[in-house]
């Protein structure tokens, strides 16, 4: 928590990925990573993204809920799959393969996001989810409504 003991609302908006690697799967991507980190620090972590209506998306939601992440604004997509990042190490080299199309590319504007933005203390967004025009537009609209929230741009694209 902050020095004043106040619980902050920290929002991650962007990609949600099912990460397959090192013999396990986990929730990842900027939206999930930011929300998970916020919860670990004693704050409210909100993940905003879009996942497929598939087993990977169901598993991701379950994992995030178990970690106490607010997933009320995670959208599901009937047509696009949950984003996937596959990490493999072969002969000491690590390869990362990101699925070329994913549900997070199709984030839709929802007026409930206005309330989230107005109540947020900080918002983190990045470049990967902005690779397509639809999600890029929604993120821009969301950030415009975030009032006094600190806005952090993550340019690392490290997922």
Image (tube, rainbow, N blue to C red):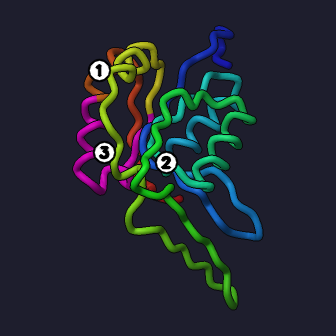
Q: Quadrant of residue 123?
A: top left
Q: Of residues 103 and 34, which is closer to you in this image?
A: 103
Residue at the extreme bottom of the image, as rendered: 91
Q: Residue 20 magenta-drawn?
A: no
Q: Which secondary structure type mostly characterizes the magenta part of the structure?
A: helix
Q: Tell me the distance, in whole angstroms, between the alpha carbons under discs 1 and 2.
A: 23 Å
Q: Secondary structure at mark 2?
A: strand
Identify the residue shown where x is 33% and y is 48%.
106
Range drawn in magenta: 124-141
Mark 3 or mark 2, which has the lower sequence index?
A: 2
Residue 27 position within the rendered picture, expressed as x and y whole percent measured from the top left: 63, 50
Q: Specify few, some or many for label 1: CA neighbours under 10 Å numbering under 14, 14-19, or 20 or more.
A: some
Q: Quadrant of residue 142?
A: top left
Q: Tell me the distance, in whole angstroms, between the alpha carbons under discs 3 and 2.
A: 13 Å
Mark 1 or mark 3, which has the lower sequence index?
A: 3
The label on residue 145 is 1
State which quarter of the image contains the N terminus: top right
């Amino acid at each position: 928590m902050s020095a004043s003991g106040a619980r902050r609302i920290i929002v991650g908006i962007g990609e949600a990925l099912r990460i397959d690697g090192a013999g396990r799967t986990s929730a990842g991507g900027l939206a999930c990573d930011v929300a998970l980190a916020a919860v670990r620090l004693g704050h409210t972590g909100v993940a905003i993204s879009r996942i497929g209506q598939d087993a990977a998306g169901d598993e991701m939601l379950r994992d995030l809920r178990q970690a106490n992440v607010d997933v009320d604004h995670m959208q599901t997509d009937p047509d696009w799959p949950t984003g996937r990042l596959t990490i493999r190490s072969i002969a000491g080299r690590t390869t990362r393969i990101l699925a070329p199309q994913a549900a997070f590319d199709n984030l839709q504007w929802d007026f409930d996001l206005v309330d989230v933005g107005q109540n947020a203390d900080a918002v983190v967004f990045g470049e990967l989810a902005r690779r397509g025009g639809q999600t890029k537009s929604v993120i821009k609209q969301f950030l415009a409504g975030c009032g006094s929230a600190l806005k952090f741009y993550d340019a690392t694209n490290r997922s």
